[in-house]
Image: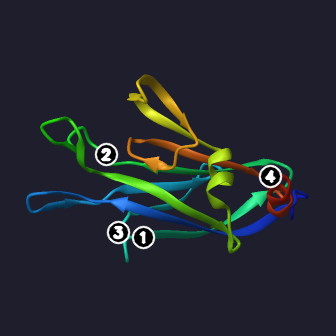
Amino acid sequence: MTDNIARENLNVEIHFKPTILTIGDRTKLPQYSVHFNNNLAVLTFAEPKDEIHIASFSIVTIVDGDNVIDVRLLNKGARDTQLDADGNIIGDLSLEIVKIMIDDIDLGDSLIKQHCIYDLAQEVNFGGEKTKQLKEHVNLSWNGSWKLTFKSPFYLWLLESL
C-alpha cells in the first residue's frame, strides 16, 4: 500500500568549522546532532579534517510543505569559554556552519542567513541585548537549535529564493 503524498529525495552536506577547546592535556570536541523534520539524521562529535568537519546525509522531503534542517550543539558547558584578564575570549567550544549543500548545490551565505533562526537554550547577552533567539547567525557557540527552513520541491524553492 502506498500513500499519495509526493516526496523528494535529496542529499545534504553541512560543512562545519569546529573550534576545539584544549585545557591542559584535555581536548573537548563539539558534539552536535542534525535532525530533519524532527527525525535524527546525525549524532556525532565534530572532528575536523583539514579544519573542516562534514556531515553528510540523505533526506526525503514532503512536497508542498515546510522542511526543517535542525542543527543542535549539545555539549557546551559553562567553563567552555576561556577569557583573558580583560574579558576577551581566547578559547571557545563552538561550531561554525561554513557551507550547506543540497544535491551538490551550495546554498551560499546569504540564502542560508535569510532562512535560518538560532533558538538558544538560555538567554544570552548578544550585541548588548538579552535574547534567546538570533537570526542570520551561523556560529553555534551556545547550546541551542539552529534551524534552516525550506520548501519542497527544493529546486522550485531555490529559484524563488534567489
> How crowded is the residue under tag 2: few (<14 C-alpha within 10 Å), some, or many (20+)?
many
**Rendered-image quadrant of the C terminus:** bottom right
Specify which label sits upstream in the sequence, 4 or 1: 1
Helix, strand or loop at disc 3? Answer: loop
Residue beneath label 3, please? 47
Specify which label sits upstream in the sequence, 2 or 4: 2
Q: Identify the residue at image location x=85%, y=53%.
A: 160
Specify which label sits upstream in the sequence, 3 or 4: 3
Residue beneath label 1, please? 52
Give how far apart the Cα atoms at labels 2 and 4 are: 33 Å
Three-letter code, disc 2: Lys
Look at the numbered discs 2 and 1 and tell me whether their residues touch, using CB distance below 8 Å.
no
Residue beneath label 2, please? 76
Helix, strand or loop at disc 1? Answer: loop
Q: In front: mark 3 or mark 4?
A: 4
Single out the residue that lies furthest toward the front: 86
Residue beneath label 4, please? 161
Specify which label sits upstream in the sequence, 3 or 1: 3
**Rendered-image quadrant of the N terminus:** bottom right
Three-letter code, disc 4: Ser
Give how far apart the Cα atoms at labels 3 and 4 are: 32 Å
